[in-house]
Image (cartoon, rainbow, N blue to C red):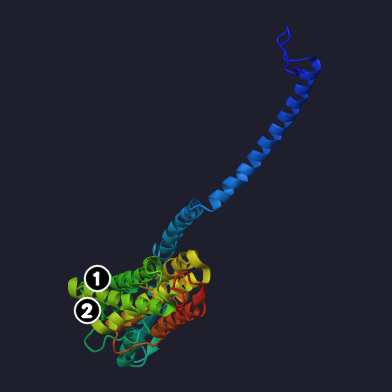
Amino acid sequence: MDDRRHALPDGSDGPEGSDGSRTAHGSHDARAGEGTGEGRRTGGAAGRWRRFKGSPFLPATVLSLLIAAAAGLFAGSYTYAMADPTPRRIPVAVVGAAGSDTADRERAEAFADAVSEDLRSSLELREYPTAAAADEALESQKVFAVLRASAGPGRERPVLEVSSASGASVAELLTEAARSAGEETGLRVAVRDAKPLDPGDPRGLALFYVTLAAVVTGFIGAIQMSIHARGLNPAERIAFTAAYSLLGGFAITAAVDWLLDAVDFPFVHSWMILALTMFTSGMVFTMFQALIGRWAMLPTWGLMVLIGNPSSGGAVSWPLLPSPLGTVGRWLPPGASVNAQHTAVYFPGYPHAQPYLVLTAWAVASCAVFWILRHRHPGGRAGGS
């Protein structure tokens, strides 16, 4: 039986019933096609998201946004801290007022009041009984200047002794305020620098820059170690962090002192401070890497650079920083490093334990957290401890 279909005169391929059947099937296929297209579109969007999520483009996109935000925060944090330094509380020693005659004492008090008013009432006067006691307060960094109210026999005007080594920005501010107050009160006050900075560092920024170099290279070294020496086991990672910190601290100290002659460092002392700073910075990153993995750079950058460096007191002295920064800066590694270096270079006879304790505490805590969570760190070799 020949079941082949024959073309009809109207050009159709079969009877109306067949054509209707084909039409019905065609409609069904069209609807199915529409459904398949919709499913394809839905499945396609989900598939594209899955592919994007598993590709390097997602972290690259997130990093682009984070880097842009970090750039703005970086500029903002430094501008907030340094663009318009405002005096908060500047301790100044006053000596000789009690032993002066009434006229001298009144002139000194009028001058101090005028300076304090010029500095928005931020001057904190501390009276000392003798010149030796006031000098010791300056050397131990309890005060930023000494006002010698009584000029003594044969001298007609008091003397304001500032200390650029205690803080160049504060010394400059006090000098300007003293001149302004002298014009206002008619009292000529001699201003001299009792503790000048090294000639190679007239602005007092070298200690800030060497600390910044130690902080940044410290955690960049840890980042590079995690990429190029991924197979290091925990103990080896700590040991190599200490190794590049010792080498880096030596290189920074030698470059600034021997090569550029900018600061006369107590070489070994300053070298050890910078090495401890680099090691602490590197271990802070390594700790965060064990805690949160590949995003460890975010808290490291925030802690050490966005907050730590502007609040360190290296570029702008603590009395001129916004109050929260001036308080927190002393307890972060960059501030502790600047403080330790500053004392070692300019006030070696009056060391303070606090900055060394802060640096050591951060280093030990970072090592301890990393060691406890070493199994979560992305590096290491099989069977390593």
Q: Which residue reaches farthest front?
A: 1
Q: Viewer-proximal residue, 127 or 212?
A: 212
**Residue located at (52% from left, 77% from top):** 373
Q: Is residue 274 above or below residue 213?
A: below
Residue position marked by numbered label 1 in the rendering: 202
The amino acid sitting under disc 2 is Asp
Number of the label disc, if any, that sits on residue 120: none
At which x and y percent is residue 222?
39, 70
The amino acid sitting under disc 1 is Pro
Residue position marked by numbered label 2 in the rendering: 264
At which x and y percent is residue 382?
46, 74
Q: Residues within 10 Å of mark 2 (few under 14, many from 20)?
A: some
Q: Can I make out residue 290 in this image?
A: yes
At which x and y percent is residue 109?
38, 81
Dot 2 or dot 1: first in sequence order is 1
Q: Viewer-proximal residue, 374 or 170?
A: 374
Q: Residues within 10 Å of mark 1 (few under 14, many from 20)?
A: some
Q: Quadrant of residue 283?
A: bottom left
